[in-house]
Image (tube, grey):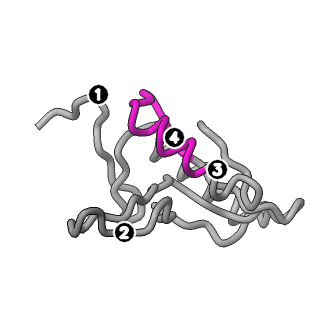
């Protein structure tokens, strides 16, 4: 079945990526990690944007944001969160704003 945005899923090192662009960025990050320029590379890290709650006795689900990658820049010590985007949906833009509001002073957010 074709992707809604024409992206082709690809597997690299046993991990599935949503697009060739994302898989390419993963390969670049692995090279940087091997060279000692970054560390603690994580794939698909999950960030809580809002806890679950009850409203009028009905359960409301928590809201999470799943980035493509996170890692530590060895030179600066900064925690970097990356998202590889070909197309920015309205949901993505909203979650990005919530993410920046909650975590923006703790991480550097990059769109690739």
Q: Is residue 86 magenta?
A: yes
SS at circle 1:
loop
**Observer-nearest of 49 and 74:** 49
Residue 26 % position (x, y) = 53, 52
Placement of the C terminus among the 4 image quadrants: top right
Which residue, given by chain and number where applicable, does mark 1 sit on?
5
Residue drawn at (61%, 60%), measured in percent from left and top?
Answer: 70
Residue 69 % position (x, y) = 55, 56
Which residue, given by chain and number where applicable, does mark 2 sit on?
52
Q: Is residue 12 magenta?
A: no
Disc 3 + disc 4, Cβ < 8 Å = no
Please identify the quarter of the rendering in which residue 14 is found. Answer: bottom left
Q: Is residue 6 left or right of residue 22?
A: left
Placement of the N terminus among the 4 image quadrants: top left
Q: Which residues are magenta?
A: 83-99
Q: Mark 2, mark 1: which one is toward the viewer?
A: 2
SS at circle 4:
loop
């Amino acid at each position: 079945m074709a992707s809604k945005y024409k992206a082709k899923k690809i597997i690299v090192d046993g991990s599935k990526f949503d697009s060739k662009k994302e898989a390419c960025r993963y390969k670049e990050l692995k090279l940087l990690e091997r060279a000692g320029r970054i560390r603690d590379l994580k794939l698909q890290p999950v960030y809580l944007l809002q806890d679950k709650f009850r409203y009028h006795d009905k359960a409301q689900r928590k809201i999470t944001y799943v980035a493509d990658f996170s890692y530590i820049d060895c030179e600066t010590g900064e925690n970097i969160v990356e998202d590889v985007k070909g197309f920015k949906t309205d949901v993505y833009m909203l979650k990005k704003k919530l993410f920046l509001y909650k975590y923006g002073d703790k991480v550097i957010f990059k769109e690739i």
